[in-house]
Amino acid sequence: MLTVSKATKKLITLAQPLLNDRRRAGLQSVRVTEALGRVLATDIISKIDVPPTANSAMDGYAFCAADAAASKFKLLVSQRVPAGTAPHPLIPSTAARIFTGGEIPLGADTVSMQEKCKEADGYVRIDKNALRGANIRAQGQDIQAGQVIIKAGTQLRAQEMGLLSSVGIPAVNVFKPLKVAIFSTGDELVEPGMSLQLGQIYNSNRATLIGLIESLGMVPVDLGAVPDRLEATEHVLKKAAMRGDVIISAGGVSVGDEDYVKKALNKVGAVEFWKVAVKPGKPLAFGHVKKVPFIGLPGNPASVFTTFMILARPFLLACQGSPVASPRRLKATAQFAKEGETREVYLRGRLTDDGVDIYPNQSSGVLSSACWGDVFVVQQSGESIEVGDHVDVLPYAL
C-alpha cells in the first residue's frame, strides 16, 4: 500500500498532463465581480500605486512640522481638503483642514487628529505632541506599480476581488472550471425523498461530493447511483469519461463479490494504483478511462469525506492549476488519548480553547463526526497519542 504522502505526490504528478491540456484548451475572461471561486490563470501585475498619492488616515489638520514648531503651534488655516479633491501646495506656516482619504498637500508632512487641535478665528492650535509623519498613508503603502499582487493558481476570494478592483482591473483570465463527473454505487442506495425499504439507506455520498466539488469552484456532473452490476458500472464509467474532465466514484472499490468498480475500470480503462495506507479509506483506486483521470473512493460516508479532503482535493486543485498541494498543518494540544494503529489515521476533530478533541465515534460510517468537527487530527502509523501531546491538525478549510 502507498503511504498518504507518496499517494498525494503521485496524484499531483499525474494531474500535470490534464492541467497542460486545459491550458492548451484556452482560458476564460470573467469580470472581477463574477470571479468568486475561479482560479487565476496568469499573474496579476499592478500598473499603479495604491494609494496613488499620500493621503490622510483621519480627519484633522495637515501641516509642516518644522513650521508648526517655529510658529509655536498656532497656524492659519489656508485651505480645506476633502477626499477626492486635488489640494493646492501648502502655503508656508499654514495648515490645511483635511479629511480622511484627502490628498496630502505638497509641503505638508504631518497630520494631527482633529480631537487634539482647536480651531478659532481662522487659526488652529496644533497638538504639540504630534510626531512628524503621523497619520499619513504613504503613496504605494499597500501596492507599488510593477508589483505582482496575485499569483497564477490563486482561487479568488472576496478579498482578492477587492484587491483586483483597487488597482483598476475590471476582468481577469481564469481557468475554465473543472468538470467532475460523480456517481455512487450500491443496490442499497435510495435518494432522499423516497421511502426506505428493508436493507436500504439514503444516499448521502452524492450530496457530500457535490458540495465538496462546488466548494472548490468546480462543476459537479451528477450521474446518480449505479446498481451493483459489472455492465452498469462499465457503462457509467464510459459516460463519465465523455462528460467530465475527472471522474470520482463512491463505493465499490473493495474486493467483495459485489464490488465492481475496479473490475470495470480494468475493462474500460486502467488502474494506476489501488489501496492507500489510510484510515478511514484504505480501498481507494486511481486510474483512467480514455485518458480521463478516475478516483474511486470507498463507500462509507465518513471515508468519502476524509479521502476526498486528503487525497482527491489536492489532485483536483492541481488539475485546476492551484499550487495548493495539501491542507496546511497546524499544531495543537491533544485533549484525548488514543492507541496507535498500523495505518495513518485521520481523526475527525474539533479545535477548542485548550487544544483539540476528537469525536467519540470514529467509525467510517459516522458522517456526523465530520459535521461536529473542523479539523483532522493526523495520527501517524504506530503512534500512540496521550493527553497533552502536541499533534498535527489539518483544518477542513484551505
Image (cartoon, helix red, strand yellow):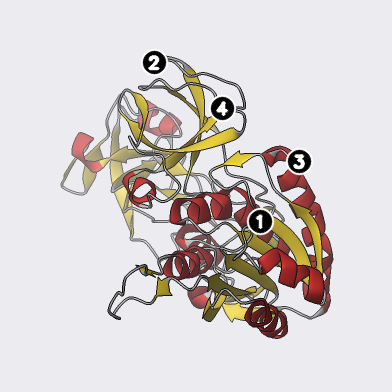
Task: Name the residue rendered at 62%, 64% in the picture.
Answer: 259
Q: Is residue 151 visible?
A: no
Q: Is residue 382 above or below residue 292?
A: above
| Left or right relative to 112: residue 122 | left
Q: Which residue has dot 2 on it?
A: 387
Q: Which residue has dot 1 on it?
A: 255
Q: Which mark is residue 6?
A: 3
User: Of marks 4 and 1, which one's residue comes earlier in the chain?
Assistant: 1
- Tag nearer the camera, 3 or 1: 1
* C-alpha gap between disc 2 and disc 4: 17 Å
- Tag nearer the camera, 3 or 4: 4
Q: Which residue has dot 4 on it?
A: 341
Are dots 3 and 4 in contact, CB under 8 Å? no
- What amino acid is at disc 4? Glu
* C-alpha gap between disc 2 and disc 1: 37 Å
Task: Name the residue rendered at 80%, 74% in the picture.
Answer: 267
Among the 4 quarters of the image, the one containing residue 196 = bottom left
Q: Which secondary structure, mark 3? A: helix
